[in-house]
Amino acid sequence: MRGRRPTPFGVLASAALVGVVLALALPLVAILTDTAPARLWASLRSDASLTALGLSFLGSGIAVLVVVVVGTPAAYVLATTRFPGRTLLGALLELPLVLPPAVAGIGLLAAFGPQGVVGGALDDAGVRLPLTFAAVVVALVFVAGPFHLRQAQSAFGALDPAVLDAARLSGAGEGAVFLRVAVPLAAPGLGAGATLTFARAIGEFGATLMFAGSLAGVTRTASLEVYTRFATDFPGALALSAVLVVISALLLLLARFLTARGEVDARA
């Protein structure tokens, strides 16, 4: 069977695909191919890199834990309950996804800084967030949390309401319906949301810099370490960037696998 003759649209669409690959994939490939293995290994072995990566993983892990514990039931309410202003509230909670990093940092300072909305109360309680590791976690929760909220809402929204109603009719309370029925059924989607949150947190830069600063061994995460090395040690910055690209790619693949698994389970 002969192949179809190319159409003008097909040619244009193929050219568009090539343009997208060049614009989005080429910089990532350049990072990986421009980093010599020896330089990459040397960068990874440095105390600064290991400390920065450790802070990134620790801060991101804590942020994901907070987001999952608090955000999952919140997403369940948003997905299964109808109330006035629900759409507006959902948009407000997702707004950090599109905020400029500088604006996110200013918002955190305006809320939790010494002169912030609740900063005075925190100071009175002996809690000072800016320029601490806790500020890193707060920044990561603010910037990355909406990824889990959005994915969790989609996962809960895709559940068959009849299954939840059947559990209620059998005598299960709302807490039991949530924990024993909704969460297990939505688990692949929830896992994808948590994975995307972790991936976004690992790469966070702007809000963390403005709110937590860049104190070596305290708040300087891997992204901030890349920025610090940029002017004086570009090969080192490139090597650490390559590590972050690989980590992000693996997390994205995991999230896509979990999302696809959830779609298969939903059709089953």
Image (cartoon, grey):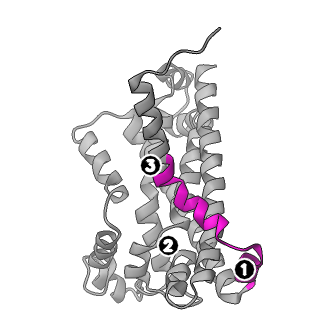
Q: Residues within 10 Å of mark 1 (few under 14, many from 20)?
A: some
Against 8, residue 150 (above or below) is below
Query: Magenta residues: mostly which secondary structure?
Result: helix
- Counting from the top left corner in percent of width and height, residue 42 is at 75, 83
Label whose residue precedes the other's in the sequence (3 or 1): 1
Left or right of residue 39, residue 179 in this image: left
Which comes sooner in the sequence, label 2 or label 1?
1
Amino acid under disc 2: Val
Confirm whether residue 73 shows in the render.
no
Q: Nearer the viewer, residue 106 or 28?
A: 28
Is label 2 in contact with label 1 (beta carbons under 8 Å)? no
What residue sits 71% from the left and 87% below the top? 46
Answer few, some or many: residues within 10 Å of disc 3's Cα (few below 14, many 20 plus, some between 14 and 19).
Answer: many
Q: How many marks?
A: 3
Q: Which residue is mark 1?
A: 39
Range of magenta residues: 21-45
Seen at 40% across and 85% down, the residue is 130
